[in-house]
Amino acid sequence: MLAAQTKQSENISREYTYTQADFEKVKKMIYASTGISLSDSKMNMVYSRLARRLRVHSLKSFKEYLNLLENAGSAEQQEFVNALTTNLTAFFRENHHFPILEQHLKTCKKPQPVNVNDSPDLKDYLEKRRNQQKIHIWCNASSTGEEPYSIAITAIRAFNSMTPPVHILATDIDTQVLQKAREGVYSLDRVEKLPQNVLKEFFYKGKGKNEGLVRVRDEVRELITFRRLNLLDDNWLIRGDFQAIFCRNVMIYFDKETQYKMLKKFVPLLDDGGLLFAGHSESLQHAADLFKLRSNTVYEVAKK
Ligand SMILES: C[S@@+](CC[C@H](N)C(=O)[O-])C[C@H]1O[C@@H](n2cnc3c(N)ncnc32)[C@H](O)[C@@H]1O
């Protein structure tokens, strides 16, 4: 089977020399750095995604590129990761999660109000802390931003305020999608399925040279902090007390062992009653000691 594949892949006429051995090396490298487990059927996908990088460096073969990658600094390694991640996403994807989130935000432990008059000496400090009394949500694998913006819009609706007491940490390993997410600018086809009132309330419509584009309103963007974070890293350097963690459609790229390790690290980060939202094809049955099903792909901690 492997020999047949090698032959087939070597016989395809391609701009750059690309062998089964190159593909195996790519698989190893991307697995080691991101946990993404590429199946054998992805050989052509890898070629077309990485060919761009060979073009940038004016190389002739994948072998040359992989050698360069091994000796290159982190900038090219990040480009390699950016090229191989799959970033498919959409506003209000898996829509059934958002009413559950809205209800959860309305009923979960509210930020504790701080009475600044209790301690006049500490007034400044307490004022500052009062402003920090937020419900925290972590959206990891946030891709180009549609998911965290959908969460932010849901929070605004839950509190009926453009400044709800909610803060969203949105992370991804791919620096290119994070940049796009921070900008919050989308073409009209990305928002065509959104109801008109949502478009009007939460987006600016581009005019002139920005015709055909929309930008997420500043108030919505201000609820989110975007950061690079590799879910495979041992230390995420983030504090706990999240009322919700969105980890959707990324576990499918990981093997069960990697999924379990990551899920175990979510447990202490969730506040009491906190919810974990998973993707539609991501079952947590193998981690039943950590999470139990609350409703359709929404989980809560089994025990702490
Ligand atoms: C298919 S998208 C899912 C986007 C969004 N969560 C959704 O459900 O619409 C998968 C995302 O996971 C990110 N990703 C893959 N491996 C990762 C890792 N090790 N750490 C963090 N993010 C990762 C990719 O960059 C990509 O943006």
Image: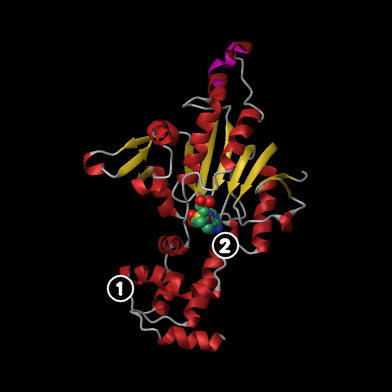
Mark 2 highlights which residue?
253
The answer to if 120 sits in the magenta stretch is yes
Q: For the point 54% across and 75% down, which residue is it? A: 40
Label 2 beta carbon within 8 A of ligand 1: yes
Label 1 beta carbon within 8 A of ligand 1: no
Compared with 287, 22 (above or below) is below
Compared with 288, 163 (above or below) is above
The spot of residue 14 in percent (x, y) is 35, 80
Q: For the point 42% across and 67% down, which residue is it? A: 72
**Residue span colored magenta:** 119-125
Disc on the earlier residue, 2 or 1: 1
Amino acid carrying mark 2 in the image? Tyr
Mark 1 highlights which residue?
58
Amino acid carrying mark 1 in the image? Ser
- In the image, taking residue 68 as reference, residue 285 lies left or right, namely right
The answer to whether residue 39 shows anywhere in this view is yes
